[in-house]
Amino acid sequence: MASPPVTPDGRYIVVRGRLWRRANPSLPDGERQALVDRLMTARRAVKAALSTDDQAGLAAARAAVDAAKVALGERGPVWWVGDDLNRHMAANTDYADWYAGLEEA
């Protein structure tokens, strides 16, 4: 599976035409990996809670996913100066020309 394209400024990946925030690249490798590990553990907990209809466990697991994503910089305050275009269609943003060039390639 090919990696999704990354905007020239490194802030977003593009999946099915939509911008998604990337993790803060200034996080030290060890810290970033620890946060990714926490995120994956929390996602497994969401799956487990869904499979057992554990509503309390599901709420806790989803909160853990959110906390990990905020710590990674994928949610919450942006790790750059400027507007956040998370979840916007790339074609409707300042990245439109860059994105159109990807589609032509």
Image: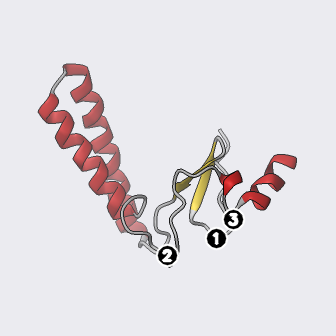
Q: Amino acid at mark 3?
A: Asp
- Please state which of the two labelled residues, at mark 3 or mark 2, is closer to the viewer: 3
Q: Is residue 23 left or right of residue 31?
A: right
Identity of the residue drawn at 19% across and 39% down: 59
Residue drawn at (46%, 68%), measured in percent from left and top? 24
Residue 57 vertical placement versus 54 (above, below):
below
Considering the numbered disc 2 on the image, is that residue within a helix, a strand or a loop?
Answer: loop
Pinpoint residue 64: horizontal percent, then vertical percent: 24, 49
Badge 1 crowding class, 10 Å Cα cut-off, few under 14, some 14 to 19, many 20 or more, is few
Question: In the visual, does 86 lie left or right of 71?
Answer: right
**Percent of width and height locating residue 16:** 64, 40
Q: Can the viewer see residue 64?
A: yes
Between 8 and 84, the one lying in front of the other is 84
Helix, strand or loop at mark 3: loop
Question: Is disc 2 surrounded by few (<14), some (14 to 19) or many (20+) residues within 10 Å?
Answer: few
Given this view, does label 3 or label 1 mark the residue nearer the observer? 3
Looking at the rendered image, the quarter that the N terminus falls into is top right
The residue at which mark 1 appears reads as 9
Badge 2 is on which residue?
Answer: 80
